[in-house]
Amino acid sequence: MTIGKVVLSTLLVFGAMVSHALEVKPYSAAALAEAQKAGKPVALHFHADWCPTCRAQEKVLQGLKSEAGLDLTVLVASYDTEKDLKRRFNVRAQSTLVVLHGEKETYRVVGDTSPGGIRAALKSAL
C-alpha cells in the first residue's frame, strides 16, 4: 500500500468518526425546529453558569464528543433566560437534559453527572 493510500484511508476513517459524533452547541429555536422537523435526535441541556452540577454535566458532554455512535446534537439553553422553552418542556430545575427524537421525548435527566447516565440518556434517542 502506498503512503498516499494510507493517508487517504486514515482520513476516511477519521471523517466517518467525526460525522457520527456528539455535537454540543448553543441553543437556537431554528436548530431545534430543524432537528425536530427532520426527525433527528437532539437534546436540550438547560444550563446555568452559576450551577456547579451544570458545569459537571458540561464536562461530561465534552468528554462524550469523541465517542463513536453518539450521532446527535446537544443544544445548550440558558436556564435563566429561556423561560418559554422551559415552559414548553416543563423544566423546573437547572441541570435538566431533555432528550428528543424528533418531537418525541425519549429520556429526561435532572442533576445526573455520571458519564454512564448521560450516555444512556443520549442513546435513548438513537
Image: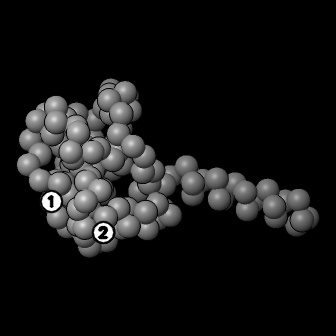
Left or right: 115 as drawn, with respect to 94 = right
Mark 2 vs mark 1: which is more N-terminal?
A: 2
Instruction: Please state the horizontal and vertical placement of residue 120, each as a whole percent of the image.
Output: 26, 63
Q: Secondary structure at mark 1?
A: strand
Is residue 10 something one can see in this rendering? yes
Left or right: 20 as drawn, with respect to 46 = right
User: Which quadrant would residue 84 be assigned to in this image?
Assistant: top left
How far apart in space, not on screen, are marks 2 and 1 (Cα)? 12 Å
Q: Nearer the viewer, residue 73 or 41?
A: 73
Do the residues under discs 2 and 1 have CB atoms within 8 angstroms? Answer: no
Q: Nearer the viewer, residue 93 or 70?
A: 93
Instruction: Please state the horizontal and vertical placement of residue 36, each as a whole percent of the image.
Output: 30, 32
Task: Identify the amino acid type marked 1.
Answer: Val
74 is higher (above) or lower (below) than 88: below
Using a 10 Å C-alpha cutoff, classify the residue at mark 1 as few (fewer than 14 neighbours), some (14 to 19) or many (20 or more).
Answer: some
Please tell me whether mark 2 or mark 1 is closer to you in this view: 2
Residue 61, which numbered label?
Answer: none
Position of the N terminus, as image quadrant, is bottom right
Residue 56, which numbered label?
Answer: 2
Residue at the image point whose x is 65% and y is 59% from the top: 14
Q: Which residue is mark 1?
A: 110
Q: Secondary structure at mark 2?
A: helix
Residue at the image point whose x is 15% and y is 39% from the top: 86
29 is higher (above) or lower (below) than 121: above
Residue at the image point whose x is 29% and y is 44% from the top: 77
Using a 10 Å C-alpha cutoff, classify the residue at mark 2 as few (fewer than 14 neighbours), some (14 to 19) or many (20 or more).
Answer: some
Is residue 124 something one can see in this rendering? no
Left or right: 122 as drawn, with respect to 10 = left
Instruction: Please state the horizontal and vertical placement of residue 13, each as a whole percent of the image.
Output: 66, 59
Instruction: Please state the horizontal and vertical placement of residue 68, each as a whole percent of the image.
Output: 48, 62
Residue at the image point whose x is 9% and y is 41% from the top: 90
Task: Identify the amino acid type marked 2.
Answer: Ala
